[in-house]
Amino acid sequence: VNILEYRPWIGFEAGTWLGGLTGDQRPFDKDSLIYDSEQIEQAIEIIGVVNVSLQISATVRLAHWIVRLEDVDLNGQVALITTG
């Protein structure tokens, strides 16, 4: 079980979320739940829709969930791949 403190303003500092984020994502990741994989050594191509299944509960009446797929380079900079 992972717990994230509810902060209704998270995301608004970035402007529009869907398709609007560019540049290094680390400032936005600090207030997010992060799940990393092992380093991928070979190039991969993502074709089609990325599917995520979540089991969530919240302590507020209305909450929005946003999932971002990101790429972390060898220097630690985080680039947005897709979001939804």
Image (cartoon, helix red, strand yellow):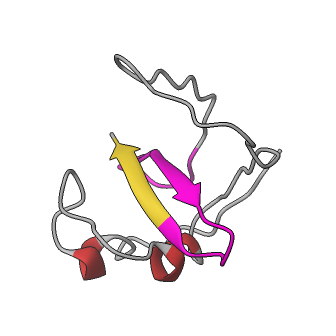
Residue for point 33% across, 39% down: 84
Location of residue 30 in the rendering, given as x and y in whole percent from the top left corner: 59, 78
The answer to whether residue 75 is left or right of residue 7 is: right
Residue for point 45% across, 72% down: 25
Residue that lies at the very extreme toward the top in this rendered image: 48
Q: Nearer the viewer, residue 46 or 57?
A: 46
Q: Nearer the viewer, residue 43 or 50?
A: 43
* Quadrant of image for the N terminus: top right
Bounds of the magenta span? 58-78
Q: Quadrant of residue 73?
A: bottom right
Does residue 5 appear in this view? Answer: yes
Secondary structure mostly seen in magenta is loop
Q: Quadrant of residue 16?
A: bottom left
The answer to whether residue 45 is left or right of residue 64 is: right
Residue that lies at the very extreme toward the front in this rendered image: 42
Residue for point 78% across, 49% down: 39
Does residue 64 appear in this view? Answer: no
Q: Nearer the viewer, residue 45 or 82?
A: 45
Against 61, residue 49 (above or below) is above
